[in-house]
Image: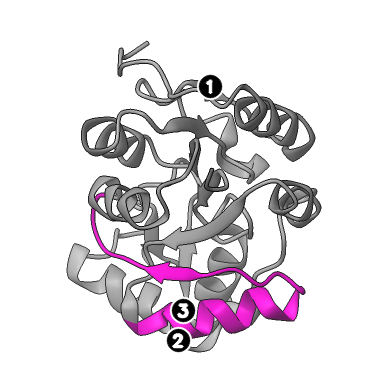
Amino acid sequence: MNRPLVITDCDEVLMHMVVPFAEWVDAEHGVIFRIEDASFANALKRKECGTPLEAAEVWPLLDGFFRKEMMRQYPIPGALAAMAAIGAEADIVVLTNVGPEHQQARIEQLALHDFHAPVIGSRGGKGEPVRRLIEEYKPSVAVFVDDLAGHHHSVAQEAPDVWRLHLVGEPAIADKIAPAPYAHARIDNWKEAQRWILARLAENIPAPAAEPV
């Protein structure tokens, strides 16, 4: 029988992102990032006048951060210890929406923290890449971990047998984000998340059909 598979996001799941990003755009670009949620909508404002940045201005900042400043990021408490424990029982793949162009940098970033796993830099909804991973690995059971509700919905549609854990590891935004309707559980600390994931692997049964909560 093939090993279980855990597919995890990186930003705000394994590594802090919005806080180091906010510190960087403030110091280097004169932009204030008001951390209200993870959407970035109207969150970035010019310090000198308070006007929101246009949508077309946001991606270049994010791209610049991931090109040059990823080393500002630091692990979510307990995340890498949990990955080590989970890795003894399952294969792990990091599925991150930084895009293919930043995939290698993400591999190197995680390696600096002694975490070595396949990394896929994707774009858009994660349902299709999760489905492809399931077809490739053919795991006995699979768990998906992400901080964004939209990805849980996408995975529920494309790979409904995969267990889905909604985890927001950044305290600055966790209490501002509602539980993902298509996730099977919402847990924001890795000690409890580790127990939940290992329990799903031990049960070794497919996730129930998608029913929004």
**Residue at point 71%, 53% (across, down):** 83
Q: Is 181 located above or below residue 72 in the figure? A: above
Given residues 41 and 85, the one toward you in this image is 85
Question: Does residue 127 appear to the left or right of 190 in the view shown?
Answer: left
Question: Where's residue 139, x and y in %?
Answer: 47, 44
Q: Which residue is mark 3?
A: 66
Q: Is 28 located above or below residue 185 in the figure? A: below
**Residue at point 29%, 58% (across, down):** 52
Query: Rounded to the nearest whole Å, what is the CA distance between mark 3 and mark 2?
Result: 4 Å
Residue 116 is a magenta residue: yes
Q: Amino acid at mark 3?
A: Phe
Q: Which residue is mark 1?
A: 185
Question: Where's residue 3, x and y in %?
Answer: 57, 47
Which portion, as a residue range, is magenta? Answer: 101-125
Q: Tags 3 and 2 in contact by the CB under 8 Å rule?
A: yes
Q: How many marks?
A: 3
Query: Rounded to the nearest whole Å, what is the CA distance between mark 1 and mark 2?
Result: 33 Å
Q: Nearer the viewer, mark 1 or mark 3?
A: 1
In the picture, the quarter occupied by the C terminus is: top left
**Residue at point 56%, 75% (across, down):** 24
In the picture, the quarter occupied by the N terminus is: top right
